[in-house]
Amino acid sequence: MKRIGYKIADGGMWVASHMPLGVLYPIGIVVYLLMYYVVRYRRKVVAENLAKSFPQKSRKELRYIEKDFYLNMADYMVETIRLGGMSRREIMSRVKFENIEVVEEHLRNGRPVVAYFSHCFNWEWATSMGAVVDVERSELSQVYRPLKSKWVDGYMLKIRQRFDSRCYTKKLVFRELIHRRNEGVATMTGFMSDQKPKHYDPRHVTMLLNQPTAMIIGTATVARKLGAAVVYMDMTKLHRGRYHVRLVPIVDDASTMDADEITERYTRLLEANICRQPSIWLWSHRRWKSKVVLPEKPEKPEKPEKPE
């Protein structure tokens, strides 16, 4: 029965993924209305996150961002479904990459690239970068966390790897990147690093959006071990179905910089990205569920007084 159910689901998703966005977006509006007004999906979490992140904004401004966020989330859902049936030509017309030559130069020189990106809509479409980069003996990949549902996990892996991109689990990514390097393949790997680190993960504590925040430091650690170049994928939603991704260099050789400093630079770029267009970030994520305390700065020693 499960196999029959999976086959039916596959067929349904194939049909939906080949519908034009002009048909899917009205469905997204219905999803938005259900999420926001009926189910009230994580409304309290979103409102609290926004209020603490932007204390200077009025209630009216915060409510506008909140509603726009749910609209963007609904767009994300139908756009991700559409990704499964989208042609290479269409995705390249809908997502424009700036500064891609920076990454291509590193790959041609055989240097791996570690790319920070975040839960800014629509991050799933950013996987189409594999359709744009044109460097021999190179590979584009991303780190993912397996989902509980085997069918959903398999479907998401399929659409994320459509445009010459590969997916690696967090546990295996470093080993796989070492293998690629030994094979003479230059890699660019995307790390979704704006999630809350698990309790056993090393972390860098800093301020993000007006709140003490623990940031994942594993991305910077991997980059340092590989001697990789590090970039940030700055995401902008131009309007429905149109995105712009700017590749911002962080450091050309991560082994020359401390992991905390790399993480701090990423945090500042992420914060600027969110503040520029707050409604495209995933505010429903319980990012600040656990309280974090900023480390105390060491006091500067007093200079000895000069003798008169």
Image (tube, helix red, strand yellow):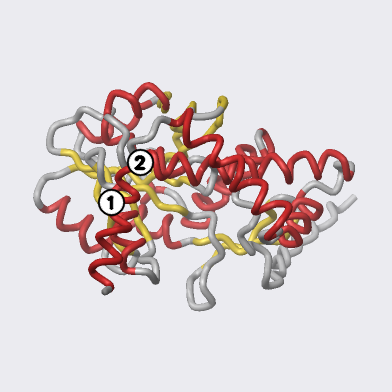
**Place of residue 123 in the rendered image (x, y in percent of width and height, measured from the top left):** 46, 43
Q: Tag 2: residue type?
A: Ser
Badge 1 amino acid: Gly
In the drawing, does residue 109 fall left or right of residue 20?
left
Residue positioned 66% across, 61% down in the render: 213
- For the point 69% across and 69% down, the residue is 292
The quadrant of the image that shows the N terminus is bottom left
Q: Which residue is mark 1?
A: 11
State the residue position of label 2: 17
Instruction: State the image quarter where residue 156 is shown.
Output: bottom left
> Of callouts 2 and 1, which one flags the residue occurring earlier in the amino acid sequence?
1
The residue positioned 54% from the left and 77% from the top of the image is 199
Query: How many angstroms separate mark 2 from mark 1 (CA)?
Result: 10 Å
Is 283 placed left or right of 153 in the picture? right
Tell me: 212 left or right of 249. Answer: right
Question: Residue 178: image x %, image y %?
Answer: 20, 57
Tag 1 secondary structure: helix
Please state the horizontal and vertical placement of residue 129, each as a whole percent of the image: 33, 34
Where is residue 251? Give x, y as percent.
Answer: 43, 40
